[in-house]
Amino acid sequence: MTNHELIVRYFDSLNARDWAGFSALLDEHVVYEMPQTRERVRGREAYVDFNVTYPAAWKLEPVRIIADESRGSSEFKCFVENEVLVAIAFFEFNGEKIVRITDYWPEAYEPPARASRFVERV
Amino acid sequence: MTNHELIVRYFDSLNARDWAGFSALLDEHVVYEMPQTRERVRGREAYVDFNVTYPAAWKLEPVRIIADESRGSSEFKCFVENEVLVAIAFFEFNGEKIVRITDYWPEAYEPPARASRFVERV
């Protein structure tokens, strides 16, 4: 299984609530981190529990997946309660298992004044 | 030049304010987007101007760079005015030029209550 496929299965198994399949992708000592809140979950059992107990009927949809021999990243959408959030995950691998996930959940904000006259609003 | 090297040079030329070297990495029709503020800058001349005119003495330091044949991403630190911000850029390439950059600037926030008992604060 390539690292790209490993990330595809990560999202697929989460969406399917296939906890056995999800767990099989994770290294026993996987670490999950959210730098914005300085939260960390350590170990496969703990990280599966974090997802099993996560409230709300979320569904994840990768926008892009990029992977090389040892690392990967994905920009993905999270559909939850009539909202669409965009998030980013970085992955590190140990053999064919995911050993570290770093998750960012950037929020919208009002732009500052820009010095360049070339900035458009979409 | 590999896509990984292209990203290294992107940061190096920005830090050096080497605008000729920076410009040479960009496709003529490069598009720069910041989804959080819905801002967009279109074209090489415009995106160079955006960086030339950007205020403050920032310095960028890639934490990781991941690239495959057509796309790349980087988590990077931005040192600016005694602050350290963490940001994420996704890159798309056209030949040996950067043709699209998508930039995220996630901010810290207080975590919600978590259902799992395994979440630690770092």
Image: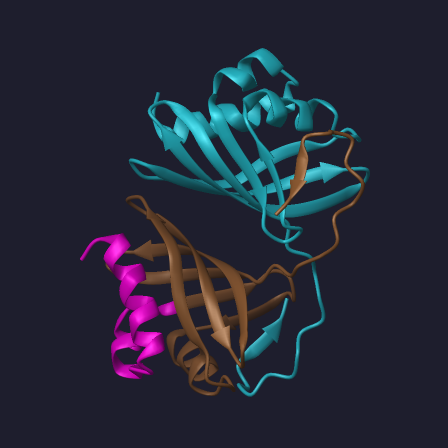
Chain colours: A cyan, B brown
Q: Residue furthest top?
A: A20
- Asked which quadrant contains residue B112, the reply is top right
Residue A99 placement (x, y as % from top left) = 44, 31
Q: Nearer the viewer, residue A86 or A106?
A: A106
Whether residue B62 is in magenta: the answer is no
Q: Residue at x 39, y 68 (%)?
A: B29
Dominant secondary structure, magenta: helix
- Asked which quadrant contains residue B48, the reply is bottom left
Q: Is residue B37 above or below residue B57?
A: above
| The N terminus of chain B sits in image quarter | bottom left
Q: Is residue A26 above or below residue A78?
A: above
* Image: magenta residue range: B1-29
Q: Residue at x 40, y 39 (%)?
A: A72
- Asked which quadrant contains residue B30, the reply is bottom left
Q: Decide if residue B93 is on the left or right side of residue A75.
A: left
- The total number of labels drawn is 0
Q: Is residue A17 above or below residue B70?
A: above
Q: Nearer the viewer, residue B93 or A103?
A: A103
Q: Residue at x 30, y 71 (%)?
A: B12
Q: Is residue A53 above or below residue B40?
A: above
Whether residue B5 is in magenta: the answer is yes
Q: Is residue A3 visible?
A: yes
Q: Is residue B95 visible?
A: no
Residue A1 placement (x, y as % from top left) = 35, 20
Residue B51 placement (x, y as % from top left) = 44, 80
Residue A48 placement (x, y as % from top left) = 62, 22
